[in-house]
Image (cartoon, grey):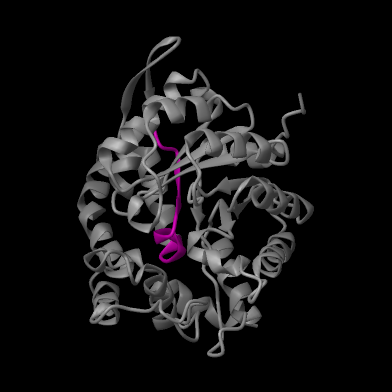
Amino acid sequence: MAAVPALREEAARTLARGAVIPAHPLALTATRRLDERRQRALTRYYLAAGAGGVAVGVHTTQFEIRDPEHALFEPVLALAAEELDAHGDPDVVRIAGVAGGTGQAVAEAELARSLGYDAVLVSPRVAGADERALLERARAVGEVLPVVGFYLQTAIGGPVLDRAFWREFASIPSVVAVKAAPFDRYRTLELVRGVAASGRADEIALYTGNDDAIVADLLSEFHVASPDGPRTLRFVGGLLGQWAVGTRAAVSVLDLSREAAGGDVAAYAALGRMASDLVDVNQAVFDPGNDFHGVIAGVHEMLRQQGLLEGIWCLDPAEGLSPGQAEEIARVRRDYPELNDDAFIAAHREEWLR
């Protein structure tokens, strides 16, 4: 049996404690070429905002970066790695998204390892793969780098995965974290119960990816059964497309959730007041009213309005904003400035764009 790859000590500590991990967008020019200057600026923004990690090559980065006509998977991962090296903080966790069947996913994990990434987030969106195939792929990838599981919502191609799947997935020794993003409270609970049933809950960090329920996830206690008896589990952080915007504010949200979990009533009340505001921001950015058609373009539009991106271009020309979405994003920027980092970005944008 192959040895289980270990996380760097600093990365393991950060992941277990909990962190804000933005899902990194892709900066393009009007000709849909990589805009290296703005791509670097985004990474610098996340690091300056206090993110505890970045996730690159994931859905928010656009799965199409892997297509031969674009060939952007390696360049995009390399740019982020260079900025992380320049930042010099060993506590920042480096996560690369991997996709495709077993062969492709293993090759992408090997590339990520060569670029200094700590772990890989495995996309469950694989054509024709059943649960058994997804588990075998995770085991193969886990021989290269530690694995972060991913429950992706069905609206953008994720499969329905039951408690038994997550119990077996969490039993894989190389799994170090799981991102719950089914956008469904029942399925989120099934994931948590599956992780608990694996007997490895103390070794696996739970991260919310439910962009529509961030505060709810961070405040929730999950009372679940485990092989060692009843357990209480919590989400320790988030790996989120929503946290690709308002990242500094997200750090404050996570700090408040820790204070609330420690019994701070004022922190709990503050989170309660902002919970629906954050959902409103997410609704504008993610475009659920149009089946998430504008989700990636919405992230881009927020960053464009703030001056970090030049435009909202996606690799797929068919991806764009829905009617009225830009106005909705402008509205939530006006209504909730404390959640969107406008002043912080304005103060540092030129520095990051150098």
Q: Residue 285: image x %, image y %?
A: 32, 69
Q: Magenta span has 191?
A: no
The N terminus, quarter of image: top right
Q: Residue furthest front?
A: 128
- The reply, left or right, for residue 326 in relation to residue 164 is left
Q: Residue 98: image x %, image y %?
A: 60, 52
Q: Residue 298: image x %, image y %?
A: 37, 73
Q: Residue furthest top?
A: 228
Q: Is residue 13 something that shows in the picture? A: no
Q: Quadrant of residue 164?
A: top left
Residues shaded magenta: 234-247
Q: Magenta span has 242?
A: yes
Residue at (43, 60) in percent of width and height? 241
Q: Is residue 191 something that shows in the picture? A: yes
- The reply, left or right, for residue 332 in relation to residue 78 is left
Q: Quadrant of residue 332?
A: bottom left
- The relative height of residue 177 versus residue 317 in the rendered view (above or below) is above
Residue at (50, 25) in percent of width and height? 168
Q: How many marks?
A: 0
Q: Residue 259: image x %, image y %?
A: 37, 39
The C terminus, quarter of image: bottom right
Residue at (48, 39) in percent of width and height? 130
Residue at (24, 52) in percent of width and height? 275
